[in-house]
Image: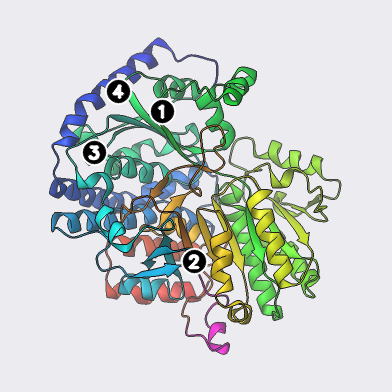
């Protein structure tokens, strides 16, 4: 953290907030499951009521034109996932109220390595209609049985009166649903009352967040603070705080846990953290997209190039799970055509301001490290011709901005996949998410070997023909790094969030999507109804579709579907 100290007035305010929460813990402990579900329902109504205000605040600080299709990103990653998570959490609490497990009614399967999987998408008829062609499974660690999954689901809600003190959530500054979702997880999964410290970038959302969290604030279970690193540093080190959860970068994590500069590095090397309390985190890294070679049409090449441009440029590239390195076979006969389309897709994506602090410096750092760096329209940078033997910092430095690298690896499909798995697991920083793209004929040819590839990739979310961001948007999926990291080698973090089924110790989420969008999918013998997804950066109707989806999540109903479908098909 920064070496500056908060003012006396700020210290008094932080102390007051923490003392409020110490008292509020008793009120939270006294809430039975019925009351906790009622609070979720009240927050659901508040989110629906203030969704427009929420999106306006996000559009303002990200400096987006109000008539831009990119406004759809703020609907889809702001109020929409909060609405779906509140609904899914309420359903889990209701199941526990009735003596059932939250996973009752969800189908189970088997995954490689003796793993049990829980199919979390599609679950409802609405999922099947609105996300047709997409699916998601949560894989449990090897050896965990179906019955263990069932009996352990519920986490702290199995014993709601046994609370766990005051927790701090250090809110993210990029995706506006993150702070709210993290607060909900601390309260409902971990039974901790919460001091939410906003990232200064999102201070404009203070009033909205206060309205959304008002039921918990009124109870005394949540307080919201603003301020800089000095406020955050005093708060996380407060003696009455028992736990810290943060979203950000590994570098920020280490500064908080071990302290800044050389002294912090020395503490990290010695394994002696400065912060003497448990810390969980969702951090970024260098997320890869593995393009499995196959025989693609020109339309396929163009569409998947836009898909990867979306994985990079959604939210301007300021996503913890933004793709940063594309792994492609140097022996793929269509490689050059694909890269041509990729360059074009990166250039054609709508321009937007570099709103996140330090973006230009990180982009310049990437350009300075590679002599062949290519600047594209809109401030994007494409790095190609990396040496596989010495690929440079693009594999180990999270640029958190509009920088995309392409690393070519040799070999046919089998050799390439072996090299790609090794590169992703051993050479890239972080383990938050990995994307795979493969033609349906390639998937059929690989058969069961593809699931083994997914199992070998040590990432918290693995997406096949979908962006890992779909896992973020799936309330019942787990979200976080691959398990096993430690404070002194944190990679993409420790623990999970979201996980509205309250599964105990999930290993990863596996997302699958359609290779071809509708209506072209029908020409390839598929019944998939999903057109170009509204989160694609080139989707022309994303703002309208995003607003309609959030409205539907607020009040699911058959009569809302025609407008959603009509808007989505025009994208």
Q: Can you tell which mark lies on residue 112?
A: 2
Kindly report which numbered mark, 4 or 2, lies closer to the viewer in this rendering: 2
**Cβ atoms under marks 2 and 3 closer than 8 Å:** no
| Residue shown at 74% from the left, 42% from the top | 393
Q: Secondary structure at mark 4?
A: helix
Q: Secondary structure at mark 3?
A: helix
**3D distance between C-alphas at marks 2 and 3:** 41 Å
Q: Spatial distance from mark 4 to mark 2, Cα to Cα?
A: 46 Å
Please name the residue that numbered disc 1 is placed on.
226
Between the residue at mark 4 and the residue at mark 1, the CA separation in whole angstroms equals 14 Å
Give the percent coordinates (x, y) of residue 408. Answer: 78, 60
Answer yes or no: is residue 321 visible. Answer: yes
Point out which mark residue 279 bears: none
Residue where numbered disc 3 is placed = 216
Q: Position of residue 266 (x, y in %)?
A: 62, 20
Q: Residues within 10 Å of mark 1 (few under 14, many from 20)?
A: some
Q: Is residue 245 above or below residue 299?
A: above
Depicted 455 relative to depicted 488: above or below: below
Query: In the rendering, at what x and y percent does residue 555 appear?
Result: 27, 63
């Amino acid at each position: 953290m920064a070496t500056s100290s908060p003012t006396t007035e700020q210290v008094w305010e932080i102390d007051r907030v923490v003392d409020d929460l110490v008292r509020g813990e008793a009120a939270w402990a006294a809430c039975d499951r019925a009351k906790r579900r009622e609070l979720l329902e009240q927050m659901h109504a508040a989110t629906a009521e203030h969704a427009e205000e929420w999106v306006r605040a996000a559009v303002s600080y990200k400096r987006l034109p109000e008539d831009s299709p990119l406004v759809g990103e703020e609907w889809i990653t702001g109020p929409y996932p909060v609405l779906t998570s509140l609904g899914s959490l309420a359903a889990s609490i209701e199941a526990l109220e009735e003596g059932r497990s939250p996973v009752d009614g969800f189908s189970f399967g088997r995954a490689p390595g003796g793993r049990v999987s829980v199919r979390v998408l599609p679950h409802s008829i609405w999922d099947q209609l609105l996300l047709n062609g997409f699916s998601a499974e949560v894989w449990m660690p090897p050896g965990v049985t179906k019955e263990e999954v069932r009996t352990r689901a519920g986490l702290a809600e199995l014993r709601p009166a046994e609370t766990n003190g005051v927790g701090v959530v250090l809110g993210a500054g990029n995706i506006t649903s993150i702070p709210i979702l993290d607060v909900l997880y601390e309260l409902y999964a971990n039974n901790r009352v919460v001091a939410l410290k906003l990232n200064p970038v999102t201070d404009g959302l203070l009033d909205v967040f206060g309205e959304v969290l008002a039921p918990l604030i009124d109870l005394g279970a949540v307080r919201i603070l603003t301020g800089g690193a000095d406020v955050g540093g005093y708060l996380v080190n407060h003696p009455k705080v028992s736990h810290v959860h943060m979203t950000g970068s590994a570098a920020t994590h280490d500064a908080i846990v071990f302290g800044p500069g050389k002294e912090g590095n020395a503490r990290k090397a010695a394994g002696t953290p400065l912060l003497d309390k448990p810390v969980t985190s969702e951090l970024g890294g260098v997320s890869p997209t593995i393009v499995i070679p196959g025989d693609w049409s020109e339309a396929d090449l163009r569409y998947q190039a836009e898909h990867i441009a979306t994985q990079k440029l959604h939210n301007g590239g300021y996503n913890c799970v933004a793709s940063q390195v594309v792994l492609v076979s140097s022996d793929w006969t269509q490689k050059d055509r694909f890269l041509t389309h990729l360059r074009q897709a990166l250039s054609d994506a709508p321009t937007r301001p570099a709103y996140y602090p330090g973006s230009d410096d990180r982009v310049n750092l990437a350009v300075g490290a590679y002599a062949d760096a290519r600047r594209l329209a809109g401030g994007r940078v494409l790095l190609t011709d990396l040496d596989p033997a010495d690929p440079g910092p693009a594999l180990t430095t999270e640029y958190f901005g509009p920088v995309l690298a392409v690393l070519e690896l040799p070999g046919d499909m089998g050799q390439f996949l072996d090299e790609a798995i090794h590169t992703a697991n051993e050479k890239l920083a972080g383990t938050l998410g990995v994307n795979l793209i493969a033609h349906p004929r390639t998937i059929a040819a690989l058969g069961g070997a593809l699931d083994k590839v997914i199992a070998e990739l040590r990432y918290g979310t693995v997406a096949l023909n979908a962006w890992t961001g779909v896992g973020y948007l799936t309330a019942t999926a787990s979200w976080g790094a691959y398990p096993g990291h430690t404070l002194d080698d944190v990679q993409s973090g420790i623990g999970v969030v979201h996980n509205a089924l309250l599964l105990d110790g999930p290993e990863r989420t596996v997302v699958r999507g359609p290779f071809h969008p509708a209506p072209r999918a029908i020409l390839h013998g598929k019944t998939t109804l999903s057109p170009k997804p509204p989160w694609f950066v080139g989707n022309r109707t994303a703002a309208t579709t995003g607003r309609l989806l959030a409205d539907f999540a607020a009040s699911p109903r058959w009569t809302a579907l025609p407008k959603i479908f009509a808007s989505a098909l025009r994208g």
